Amino acid sequence: MKSVLLIGLGRFGRHMAQKLNDLNHEVMAIDKKEERVDTVLPFVTNAQIGDSTNKDFLESLGVNNYDMCIVAIGNDFQSSLETTSLLKELGAKTVISRASRDIHAKFLLRNGADQVIYPEKQVANWAAIRYSADHILDFIEIDEKFVIFEVVTPNEWIGKTISQIDIRKKFGINIMAIKQGGKMSLTIHPDKVLKEDETMLVVGELKDIQKCFHI
């Protein structure tokens, strides 16, 4: 369980508050608007109405006592930038800030953000890949180079063993797990025969997975 200072309670901030609550973290939620604060009260440990660009207000929160501070301000980049900078100045351990554009991300990182969340871009990338190919069910970016994909088993692989398709040697891709009927098996044997009603979780470089599965 972590203690989290969450600043900015728009749609993204509210979803963040709900999920952090589901994960049993302690959340202090902050926003300038009273109605936004009232909305998240059922999901947070505590909440206050206040201006996060006010140094005295932020200092009164004891920001250095939180395991992480999340700046979820979406529509006011100047406030997001000032808040990020002040948090770091006041000794925040970890500052994670939301960006809506590439240039915003660069400025936030230069002004104290330890990490940047880019929800619009990340969701757009996910949706573009997920829905532009019928055989792609999900994917996760590990970093700029490596990804995990859940893919439908190609027809030409059905009835063959993992050693026979040998995608590690041919494409540099590893099969992490096999899913069938909503159940996942992480024990992958070379003599495992692939079936029609199974999907696979594969990991590798994006370019290799794109080539292997014709994405």
Image (cartoon, rainbow, N blue to C red):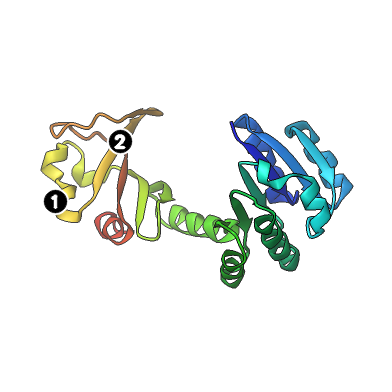
Give the residue type at disc 2.
Answer: Ala
Quarter of the image for residue 208 reads bottom left
In the displayed structure image, the side of residue 204 where residue 18 appears, left or right: right
Q: Position of residue 130 (x, y in %)?
A: 45, 52
Per the image, label 2 sits on a secondary structure element best described as strand
Task: Measure the C-alpha gap from mark 1 to mark 2.
Answer: 18 Å
Q: In the rendered image, which residue does mark 1 sit on?
A: 169
At a point 69% along the width and 44% down the height, the residue shown is 5
The quarter in which the C terminus is drawn is: bottom left
Looking at the image, how many numbered discs can be counted on the residues? 2
Q: Tell me which corner region of the image, top left, top right, bottom left or bottom right, holds residue 192.
A: top left
Whether the residues at callouts 1 and 2 have beta carbons within 8 Å, the answer is no
For label 1, the SS is helix
Q: Which residue lies furthest to the right in this view?
A: 34
Q: Where is residue 214 in the image (x, y as percent from the top left)?
A: 29, 58
Is residue 38 placed above or below 119 in the rendered structure? above
Query: Seen in the image, is 193 located left or right of residue 186?
Result: left
Residue farthest to the bottom?
103
Residue 127 percent coordinates (x, y) = 50, 55
Dot placed on the residue nearer the N-terminal end, 1 or 2: 1
Residue 15 shows up from this direction: no
Please give the name of the residue rendered at 30% of the width and 45% of the height, measured from the top-left corner. Answer: 202
Front residue of this view, candidates 141 and 210: 141
Q: Name the residue under label 2.
A: 177
Q: In this view, does 119 lie to the left or right of 90?
A: left
Residue at point 30%, 34% (across, down): 178
The image position of residue 206, as x and y in percent, is 33, 58
* Camera-nearest residue between 212 and 8: 8
User: Which of the pair 141/165 is nearer the observer?
Assistant: 141
Asked if one can make out residue 89 in the rendered structure from this viewpoint, the answer is yes
